[in-house]
Image (spheres, rainbow, N blue to C red):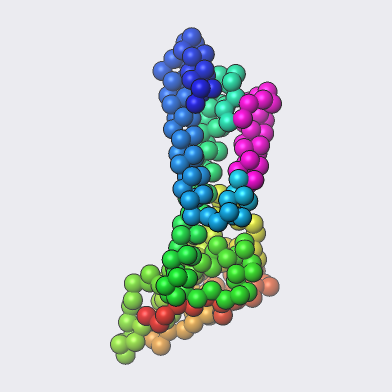
């Protein structure tokens, strides 16, 4: 915080007092939010996970410094915010990357917290194949959460509409995986990446119907012919994962 105050002092002697002050204030706020997110994540980790997160955070600091140096030709010294950064590009870079990292840490906290809660209450059962894939596990954990939180829709028979349930869960999984990728919180995964592509193309309803689970009632609004043509061109080697390894109690 002392270093940031030095930046504020330097900026007060420039003609751009108000604008610079806002940038410094924003950088300080994002720095504080990042520290809070980091501490909140540490609270729910075991010792080994804390060690790994600390290492990851130090690597992220180096990454952030390198990016901001590239953008503003900054000197290579300092730890958090460098002592002689006085231009708006540098402060904007720091704020932007700190905000992105805060989102990543918040997502980690949600994933870990939800995972602990669900496993303790035996509400979501995670298969060994998923647990062994630490990268894809992030996406499939949210798939299980979506199955559990699905607002029940019934068939005419009075039974839960499992097509709608699967559509809800796969759509939520695609949205979460897309956000995780945007924040660089995960690495590529063939199936989940392709699920995002299908979702973005607007064919999730057709995909779930054709590949995963059909409803007991005919869906008249589906564009099945267009979907078949689209997936043949865009994802010709796609292999659907029907049995995900994630289970919850029947709705």
Q: Residue at x 55, y 32 (%)?
A: 94
Location of residue 26 with respect to 60 vertically, above or below? above
Q: Position of residue 178 (x, y in %)?
A: 54, 57
Residue 74 inside the magenta-drawn segment: yes
What kind of secondary structure does the magenta stretch mostly adopt?
helix
Instruction: Report x, y in % for residue 175.
Output: 49, 60
Q: Which sits in the foreground, 12 or 233?
A: 12
Q: 39 above or below 69?
A: below
Q: Is residue 55 visible?
A: yes
Residue 49 inside the magenta-drawn segment: no
Q: Quadrant of residue 25?
A: top left
Compare residues 110 and 239 and report the one nearer the observer.
Answer: 110
Q: Is residue 199 above or below residue 53?
A: below
Q: Position of residue 246 (x, y in %)?
A: 52, 75
Q: Residue at x 67, y 30 (%)?
A: 70
Residue found 60% across the figure and 24% down from its top: 82
Is residue 167 in view?
Answer: no
- The span shown in magenta is 55-79
Residue 20 location (% of width, % of height): 47, 20
Residue in view at x 60 percent, y 71 percent: 130
């Amino acid at each position: 915080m002392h270093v940031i105050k030095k930046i504020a002092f330097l900026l007060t002697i420039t003609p751009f007092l108000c604008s610079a002050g806002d940038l410094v204030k924003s950088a300080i706020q994002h720095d504080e939010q990042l520290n809070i997110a980091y501490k909140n994540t540490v609270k729910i980790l075991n010792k080994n996970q804390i060690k790994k997160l600390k290492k990851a955070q130090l690597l992220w600091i180096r990454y952030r410094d390198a990016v901001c140096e590239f953008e503003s030709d900054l000197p290579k010294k300092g730890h958090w915010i460098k002592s002689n950064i006085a231009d708006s590009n540098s402060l904007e870079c720091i704020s932007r990357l700190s905000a992105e990292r805060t989102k990543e840490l918040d997502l980690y906290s949600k994933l870990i917290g939800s995972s602990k809660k669900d496993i303790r209450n035996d509400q979501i059962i995670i298969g060994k194949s998923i647990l062994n894939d630490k990268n894809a596990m992030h996406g499939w954990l949210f798939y299980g959460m979506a199955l559990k939180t699905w607002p029940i829709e019934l068939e005419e028979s009075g039974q839960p509409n499992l097509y709608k349930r699967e559509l809800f869960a796969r759509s939520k999984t695609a949205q979460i995986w897309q956000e995780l990728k945007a924040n660089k919180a995960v690495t590529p995964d063939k199936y989940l990446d392709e699920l995002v592509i299908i979702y973005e193309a607007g064919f999730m309803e057709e995909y779930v119907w054709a590949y995963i689970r059909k409803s007991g009632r005919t869906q008249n609004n589906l564009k099945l012919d267009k979907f078949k043509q689209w997936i043949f061109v865009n994802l010709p080697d796609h292999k659907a994962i029907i049995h995900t390894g994630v289970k919850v109690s029947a709705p």
